[in-house]
Image (tube, rainbow, N blue to C red):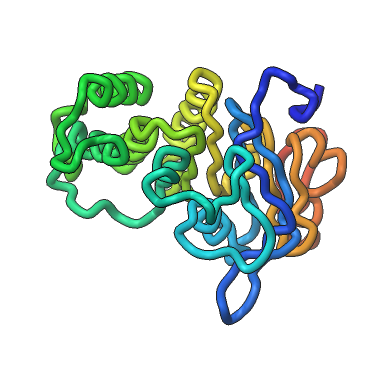
Amino acid sequence: MSFKEDQNSQVTLEVTDLAIGYKSGSLAKNINFTLFEGKLTAIVGINGIGKSTLLRTLGNVQPKLAGSIQIKKKELENYRSIELATKISLVLTEPIASKNMSVLELIALGRQPYTNWIGNLSKDDKTKIEEAVAMLQLQELQHRKCFELSDGQLQRVMIARALAQDTSIILLDEPTTHLDLYHKVHILKLLKSIADQTKKTIIFTSHEIEMAIQLCDTMLLLDGEKNPFGQPCELIEQKAFETLFPAEVVSFDASTGSFRIQK
């Protein structure tokens, strides 16, 4: 059964004929996809194709060039900033403002859209923070300073902050950058588990194409023109991965879902 036929899932994000880029020119156009609650989606593609730009455009950090982005059937630009902050949480690659904060203090920042003007945390706020700490397995780290954490630990804290924000959509830019193989897998499996358990729509950009094929519900292969979208098995059947890199350098093995270096 395709996701479009799943009557138990709700559409959270619809993108139609989207073009992204800057005033100086377009990076990618003809981007079309529909995402449902509880699904994990990867945006993959070669360097410089616009993966991070797409993510920032979906998060309303930068304007689109053309097309439509709908969150829960409402155009993105029609949301007020404070309202959008309750619909979308965004984890970019920029460093945090201060690593002198404790893990709990950083996660608590995710509750800013809901706190009063002096930032007091309600009982519900504290519950959401506790749930995020537990889901990201941060109980033993919650009172440590952020500068004491490894890259993998800090990445889990950033995801916990987004989770504490309690939005229906979570956007993450390269959440596995600078991590070793074990921690890459650990982070992606955590994201899959969070999507399954919380019914949130989680979208991330990545160079880890083979991992995404194994773990994601859907993938967007950003190539700038056709931008194939679908379940990994569908994209393999369409031979979408075979044209991602020059064939004389790297080839895609559809039987194993992996890339091979041409010697």
The residue located at (37%, 21%) in the rendering is: 135
Q: Is residue 21 above or below residue 150?
A: below
Which residue does the image show at 73% across and 51% down from the upper left? 32
Please tell me which residue lies in front, 253 or 231. 231
Q: Is residue 145 above or below residue 222?
A: above
Where does residue 146 sit, x and y in percent of width and height?
Answer: 19, 41
Determine the residue positioned at 29% across, 55% down.
95
Closest to the observer, 71 or 44: 71
Quadrant in which the N terminus appears: top right
The quadrant in which residue 157 appears is top left
Q: Is residue 68 left or right of residue 191?
A: right
Q: Quadrant of residue 14?
A: top right
Query: Could you tell me if residue 263 is visible in this image?
Result: no
Residue 33 pos. (x, y %): 71, 45
Q: Position of residue 65 (x, y in %)?
A: 62, 68
Task: Identify which residue is drawn at 53% across, 56% down.
Answer: 77
Indicate the quadrant containing the C terminus: top left, top right, bottom left or bottom right.
bottom right
Locate residue 87, reporting x and y percent.
Answer: 47, 39
The residue positioned farthest toward the right in the image shown:
238
Q: Is residue 65 visible?
A: yes
